[in-house]
Image (cartoon, grey):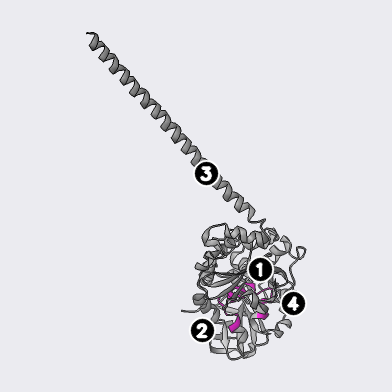
């Protein structure tokens, strides 16, 4: 009997020991799980804080050493070596000091255009450059993505060649058809190259310390920099609004004659047609479109042209979806539309315009008095440039095809 009691007592002790051990194991597991969860949370918070700090810091990283350090410590695709694998817009999207530029390029719908180009030279403003840029001007540009923003961004791009910093010297035609002057590390007299010769799959990129403003936007002649006083929010908004609402002949002439001398009716005579148009205050959208289509050199180098130039008012009246579709297809639809506005090989005065003419794209256009293709009216005729006779028209011509 005593033996049986002892056995039962021993079994009870063993059971209690097992239960105690199981409870201890559960407590330990809970503590481990809790500890792991806290560690993971802390790691996530640390990562988030690091990302936030990086985003905030990018606007304060301004010198060459700081930029290189930030770039090399970021995502591998955005390092100096890593950017070489992707086309330029994609490569820039991985670079930690180009976040504002990437946003602007996306807003302007230029990602595919830049990525599909065969060869480009790009002057890329850093986040620091954008942080120091006049914010009213930046907001005005972002509010007008296919107009002012595209015009500003296009001034940072030379199409058709990848130019190393050691070879940069002289005047170059930009994406928007305007001329940019490079002197050593100075770009357009406005910015300095701080990190040169970054290679992407289709472009050579030079990081610059200031956002460039083209003469057609700033109103400055040649390579003068825009000052804050000359480019306030009010003047920017007024300029953007006025050019699209100046529609009748008298108002157009007044606007043109009241602008910079290179864009007046007399001043345009000194330059080939694309360059001359870039100085004209009522042709800003046309200039942007010509630059996007890469037709600046073609037009400037032609011996003789007759050009029917839609004003900003004409583009403002065009269906926005049609305009965006054209800008999204620069070498196709956009070139086809713009080509309908050009007669190659002769300079025809308005008094002599009558009948059918073959255009740049091979389609036929019919002129009857001041009526062009039954779609537009000539509002200001016979503006002379160095290689073209230009007639301002009140509607954008659309090809039958």
Please, what secondary structure does the residue beneath circle 1 have?
helix
Residue 361 marker: 2
Q: Answer few, some or many: residues within 10 Å of disc 2's Cα (few below 14, many 20 plus, some between 14 and 19).
A: some
Query: Who comes first in sequence, dot 1 or dot 4?
Result: 1
Q: Residue at x 37, y 23 (%)?
A: 20
Distance from the alpha carbon under mark 4 to that under mark 2? 32 Å
Query: Who comes first in sequence, dot 3 or dot 1?
Result: 3
Distance from the alpha carbon under mark 1 to that under mark 4? 16 Å
Residue 226 percent across, percent down from the top left:
74, 67
**Circles 3, 2 touching at the beta carbon (< 8 Å):** no
Horizontal placement of 361 versus 272: left or right? left
Please, what secondary structure does the residue beneath circle 4 have?
helix
Question: Viewer-nearest of labels 1 and 2?
Answer: 2
Question: Viewer-nearest of labels 3 and 2?
Answer: 3
Q: Answer few, some or many: residues within 10 Å of disc 1's Cα (few below 14, many 20 plus, some between 14 and 19).
A: some
Residue 283 marker: none
Quadrant housing the N terminus: top left
Question: Is residue 138 in sight in this rendering?
Answer: no
- Which stretch did the figure color magenta? 275-298
Query: Who comes first in sequence, dot 4 or dot 2?
Result: 4
Q: Residue at x 60, y 62 (%)?
A: 101
Residue 111 percent across, percent down from the top left:
53, 66
Question: Viewer-nearest of labels 3 and 4?
Answer: 3
Query: Who comes first in sequence, dot 3 or dot 2?
Result: 3
Question: Viewer-nearest of labels 3 and 1?
Answer: 3
Please, what secondary structure does the residue beneath circle 2 have?
loop
Circle 1 residue: 245
Q: Is residue 282 above or below residue 126?
A: below
Question: Viewer-nearest of labels 1 and 4?
Answer: 4
Circle 3 residue: 43
The outermost residue toward the front is: 3
Horizontal placement of 340 versus 250: left or right? left
């Amino acid at each position: 009997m005593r033996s049986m009691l002892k056995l039962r007592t021993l079994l009870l002790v063993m059971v209690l020991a097992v239960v105690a051990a199981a409870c201890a194991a559960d407590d330990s597991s809970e503590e481990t799980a809790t500890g792991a969860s806290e560690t993971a949370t802390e790691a996530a918070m640390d990562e988030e804080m690091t990302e936030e700090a990086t985003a905030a810091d990018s606007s304060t990283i301004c010198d060459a050493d700081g930029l290189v350090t930030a770039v090399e410590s970021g995502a591998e695709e955005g390092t100096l070596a890593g950017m070489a694998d992707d086309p330029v817009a994609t490569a820039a999207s991985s670079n930690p000091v180009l976040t504002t530029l990437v946003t602007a390029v996306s807003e302007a719908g230029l990602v595919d255009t830049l990525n599909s180009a065969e060869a480009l030279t790009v002057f890329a403003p850093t986040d620091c450059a954008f942080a120091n840029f006049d914010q009213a001007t930046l907001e005005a540009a972002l509010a007008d993505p296919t107009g002012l923003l595209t015009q500003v961004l296009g001034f940072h791009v030379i199409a058709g060649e990848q130019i190393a910093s050691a070879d940069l010297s002289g005047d170059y035609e930009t994406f928007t058809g305007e001329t940019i002057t490079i002197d050593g590390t100075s770009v357009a007299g406005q910015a300095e190259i701080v990190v040169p010769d970054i290679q992407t799959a289709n472009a050579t990129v030079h990081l610059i310390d200031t956002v460039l403003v083209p003469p057609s936007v700033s109103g400055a002649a040649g390579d003068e920099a825009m000052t804050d006083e000359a480019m306030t929010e009010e003047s920017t908004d007024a300029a953007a609004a006025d050019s699209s609402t100046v529609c009748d002949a008298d108002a157009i002439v007044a606007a043109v004659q009241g602008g910079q001398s290179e864009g007046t009716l007399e001043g345009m005579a000194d330059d080939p047609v694309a360059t001359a148009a870039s100085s004209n205050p009522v042709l800003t959208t046309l200039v942007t479109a010509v630059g996007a289509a890469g037709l600046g050199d073609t037009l400037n180098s032609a011996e003789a042209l007759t050009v029917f130039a839609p004003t900003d008012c004409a583009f403002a009246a065009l269906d926005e979806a049609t305009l965006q579709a054209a800008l999204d297809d620069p070498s196709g639809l956009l070139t086809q539309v713009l080509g309908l506005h050009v007669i190659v090989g002769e300079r025809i005065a308005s008094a002599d315009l009558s009948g059918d003419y073959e255009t740049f794209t091979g389609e036929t256009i019919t002129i009857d008095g001041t009526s062009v293709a039954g779609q537009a009216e000539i509002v200001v005729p016979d503006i002379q440039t160095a290689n073209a006779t230009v007639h301002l028209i009140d509607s954008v011509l659309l090809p039958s095809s």
